[in-house]
Image: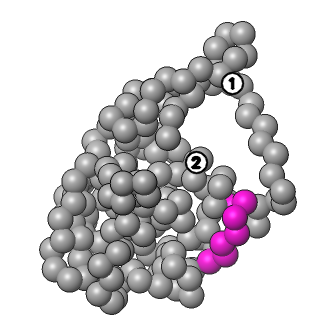
Amino acid sequence: DTNAAQTESGNIKETGKSEGNAAANTEKSDKTLVVSMAAEPANLWTIGTGQQDNQGLMVQNCIGDSLVNYDFENQEVLPCLAIEWKWVDDKRIQFTLRDDVIMNDGTPLEAADVLYTVKMATEHSANNDSGRYFDYEACEAVDEHTVIVGMNVVAPDFLSMLGESAFGIVT
């Protein structure tokens, strides 16, 4: 993914790769981006509603980030909101969160945001991939920037699934 910024003349310019380029996406703008889609999104937050559609996922991918990204070409999991992770056991992954992320509401990213997102997924999306694998009771905020995410089944590919846009973290 490449971050882009609009110049004074209205042209779009690349500002660099999103990996390791946290500062590139921090400027506020009064510009409006107009996007054309085949249909109107059913919603903008699939986890909170339990409904997924392609248009909603496309928008969600632009306004939210996930804990990790998945590089399909190289078939590897890459950092995003989490800078490192480790499996605690077969059903739990511990994530260390970046400390430089400001959420859409202006607050810093914290482990509580991940727990809130998982809770919403288990309450509203238990019938689809956004929520079916989470076990909210097995989740834990270790500290402000460390969180353990629990699953209700052994799912070796769960880490790569967290890189999908449906798993965007919200406050």
- Of label 1 and label 2, which has the lower sequence position? 1
How far across and down, in percent of the image, does residue 84 sit? Answer: 22, 54
Residue in the image at 18% along x and 65% along y: 86
How far across and down, in percent of the image, does residue 47 sit? Answer: 56, 70
* Amino acid at the residue labelled 1: Asp
Q: What secondary structure is found at the residue carrying circle 1? A: loop
| Residue 55 tag number | none
Residue in the image at 47% along x and 85% along y: 132
| In this view, 156 is above or below 70 | below
Q: What secondary structure is found at the residue carrying circle 2? A: helix
Residue that lies at the very extreme toward the top in this rendered image: 9
Q: Nearer the viewer, residue 116 or 153?
A: 153
Res 8 → quadrant: top right
Q: Mark 1 near mark 2, Cβ–Cβ under 8 Å?
A: no
Q: Nearer the viewer, residue 17 or 42?
A: 17
Q: Which residues are magenta?
A: 50-56
Residue position for label 1? 30
Is 168 positioned to the left or the right of 78 in the image? right
Residue position for label 2? 63
Is 126 positioned to the left or the right of 58 in the image? left
Residue 131 visible here: yes
Is residue 53 a member of the stretch shown in magenta? yes
| In this view, 95 is above or below 18 | below
* Amino acid at the residue labelled 2: Ile
Q: Nearer the viewer, residue 161 or 88?
A: 161
